[in-house]
Image (cartoon, rainbow, N blue to C red):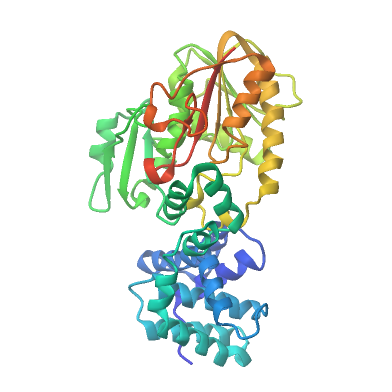
Amino acid sequence: MSRVTPERQVAFAVLRRTFEDDEHTESAFREEAVQAGISGRIRSQAQRLAFGAVQRKGTTDWVVASFMKQKGRRPDPPVVAALRLGIFELLYADGTPDHAAVDQAVSLVREAGADHAAGFCNALLRRTLRERDSLLKRLVLESTPEEAAVSHSFPDWLARLWWEELGPERARALMKAANLPAEKAVRVNTARITVEEAIERFSGPDLELTPAAGPWPLAPAELLIARGSLAAIEEATGEGLVVSQSRGSAAVVEVLDPMPEERVLDLCAGPGIKTGQIAARVGRMGNMVSIEPVEERAAEVALQLERLGFHHGLVVEADARESEILSDFDRVLVDAPCSDLGALSSRPDARWRKSPALIERVARLQSEILDRAVAFIREGGSLVYSTCTISRRENSSQAIELAERHGLTIDDLGSRAPGLADPHDTRFIQLMPDRDRTTGFFIARFTV
């Protein structure tokens, strides 16, 4: 038995913690990496293996099920984790020698105390290797939602949802995009440093920063696309000079369009990324109130504003559905809790945590928050509703029902950005990760 490399030990532990202990992959990885004392290239490799194996577990489980003689039988948990890692390496990790992927997975099984399954694991991985070409040919079949779900490692229900709501071509493209690296972008805090100064100061051998480009509202002047390692600007983030933020997220505030000295209410503020963007727009003479029901997230919002140097915002820990809040705001933002289906590329385990029941549950919560939000806006003021998901129930249907319940005027956002218009109602914007290379935000704006 060969000694298992540190990066595979960490990836194996993260797989087990994610699927056996129901822990979030990112937090489990951070803890395991610290405990293992890895950094630099080895840490990057461990993250690639851990995140990739978690993301691709739908496909690797399909391979295992295809080769099992006793259909429905499931190997022991440590064996499942080793197979998920080993098959991921054989099918998707080009830099890994085949013999190393097999040998290391079998060694992980033995180290986990499952010696009785070492032979089974070895045989299944070697069969995967022998039949790899035919497996990869089968994995390009995408004529049905179920085939596409296996090919792109998605739950069947989500493949069917997008297939039905958006059509096969867009559904396949979205699933493919969800397996690509998430966009890296930063927003410059222009209250402390100019965009030009940020580019000059932080660009270097490990990081390139360039102005964002794209149709309205994807290109706010203070947003930069990052290529390379964001570790190079961690200190600048801590100092409040820049904030990590996708173009999709920044687009929400661009649509809200807060003006200097206005009164703005951010109803679902945590963790405060958009709150800081709003604070910069209204300026020190503006009035901004941020509402967040979760104590830890409310603290994050306050810390974010302090880090950015904005002291003109009031952060309130409260439930917007029940609390008494000041009214007559010029603009209200409801960036609502949602199913997060537009942000799957940045969270490797997210797709396995979602369900149709979740969509229904958050849709009811969204409706309650939106109904309360209308009461806080002055006549002639505006309300922006956004989610980072791609689900008709939470997005266009929710927005249309809100307008009908309260007699709101729907602003025609799609006429300003036809290429970004929602496929179900062109008055709204629906960003698509495959097309726009950013988080899949839905944005609607109403006039009261």
Residue sitting at the far top: 379
Front residue (pair 328, 287): 328
Residue 260 in percent (x, y) is at 44, 13
Horizontal and vertical percent for residue 324? 74, 19
230 sits to left or right of 441 = left
Residue at 55% over, 66% down: 58
Q: Is residue 318 visible?
A: no
Image position, residue 272 (x, y; %)? 54, 34
Q: Where residue 337 sits: x, y (%)?
A: 62, 37
Residue at position x 40%, y 68% from top?
A: 45
- Tell me if 252 is positioned left or right of 302 in this view: left
Number of labels in the image equals 0
Q: Is residue 406 left or right of residue 185?
A: right
In the figure, 31 relative to 304: above or below? below
Residue at 73% across, 27% down: 321
Residue situated in front as seen by the camera: 240 or 400: 400
Place residue 193 in its image quadrant.
Answer: top left
Residue 188, above or below 109: above
Q: Is residue 276 left or right of residue 22?
A: left
Is any atom of residue 238 visible in this view?
yes
Quarter-of-image position of residue 42 = bottom left
Which residue is rendered at x = 63% and y = 60% of the image?
23
- Image: 120 above or below 310: below
Quarter of the image where the C terminus is located: top right
Return the residue found at the far front: 143
Q: Nearer the viewer, residue 434 or 167?
A: 167
